[in-house]
Amino acid sequence: MKKLILFVFLIFASRSFVANACDENGNSGYLPENDMYISVDDKMAGDMTEARFNEIIDKIAAVYEPIVRSKRGKLKVNRKWKDGTVNASAQRSGKTWIVNMYGGLARHADVTDDGFAMVVCHELGHHLGGAPKVGSFFNKWASNEGQSDYYGSSKCFRRVYANDDNVAIVAAMEVPEFATKNCMKAWSTQDDIALCQRAAMAGKSLSKLLARSGTPKFSTPDSSVVTRTNHRHPAGQCRLDTYFQGALCEKDVTDEVDNRDAKKGVCNRSTGQKIGNRPLCWYKP
């Protein structure tokens, strides 16, 4: 009997060697399955260039390669610039932590440079975002979609762009007053306020794409309340809310999240935070 149990365990363990948080073909990745495709020479493409595509990935990878290495992994970013797929995805193969970034997403007219960076951060969030997680009993390595969004703005984006001149960068943006006021409530220094605004606007640039119809706003948060945590793609407004609240969360980027304890390293209603909490439209405390 013990040999049979061991045999079954080894079968499941072997299947977990290669696993996807999102479909590597982009069918169920950062976005739900879609038929959008933006080729390199598409007239509807935005102004993203291959050089900027690589520069953004380079900057984020330079920060996260040593972090992944410290967790006994090896980060590999597949730069699929010529692929017109409008999506992104994450995988693991043994100790290799994979992020797949597609040119089609980067070229989408609604996706700014910071928006594209936020998607890279989202995919890293599948690897590093902590609980709540999804997957099989033997292979629950991936943070769910909402948590990956939240990690993207609360940890990754802030960590990567903290040393930029964010005050000057934000001065060139049209940041809605609602977002600015909330960033000022959450943060005290001009640098932190500006970084909050920048992260919020990165999420905003993705919101129309995420919603597929209509344009989500900071001032019209999703009022729905789930009865249990939604591990799939939340609605577009809900995802914008998640990016915004992540930008507002006061927890330091070095305050580590946990793979089991969903309260560690993040803002929580149960510990008195009034702002920066994961939205109830996907998260059940």
Image (spheres, rainbow, N blue to C red):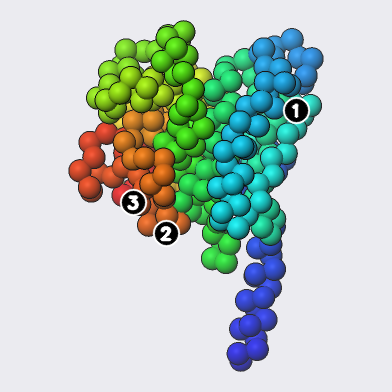
Residue at x-position 52% and y-position 48%: 128
Name which quarter of the figure residue 167 lies in: top left
For label 1, the SS is loop
Q: Is residue 82 left or right of residue 107?
A: right
Tell me residue 14's x, y (percent). Answer: 69, 68
Kindly identify which numbered label has been placed on residue 81.
Answer: 1
Residue at x-position 70% and y-position 31%: 102
Tell me residue 185's x, y (percent). Answer: 24, 24
For label 2, the SS is loop
> Are the residues at dot 2 and dot 1 in contact (C-beta closer than 8 Å)?
no
Q: Which residue is mark 3?
A: 263
Question: Would you say residue 89 is visible in this rendering?
Answer: yes
> Are the residues at dot 2 and dot 3 in contact (C-beta closer than 8 Å)?
no
Name which quarter of the figure residue 217 lies in: top left
Amino acid carrying label 2: it is: Arg
Q: Label 2 to label 3, Cα distance in Å? A: 9 Å
Name which quarter of the figure residue 34 lies in: top right
Compare residues 49 and 71 and report the one nearer the observer: 71
Q: Earlier in the sequence, mark 2 or mark 1?
A: 1
Amino acid carrying label 3: it is: Lys
How many dots with numbers? Answer: 3
- Mark 3 Cα-neighbour bin, 10 Å: few <14, some 14–19, many ≥20: some
Q: Label 3 to label 1, Cα distance in Å? A: 37 Å
Residue at x-position 24% and y-position 44%: 269
Q: Which residue is mark 2?
A: 260
Q: Is residue 104 left or right of residue 239?
A: right
Q: Label 2 to label 1, Cα distance in Å? A: 35 Å
- Mark 1 Cα-neighbour bin, 10 Å: few <14, some 14–19, many ≥20: many
Residue at x-position 79% and y-position 15%: 41
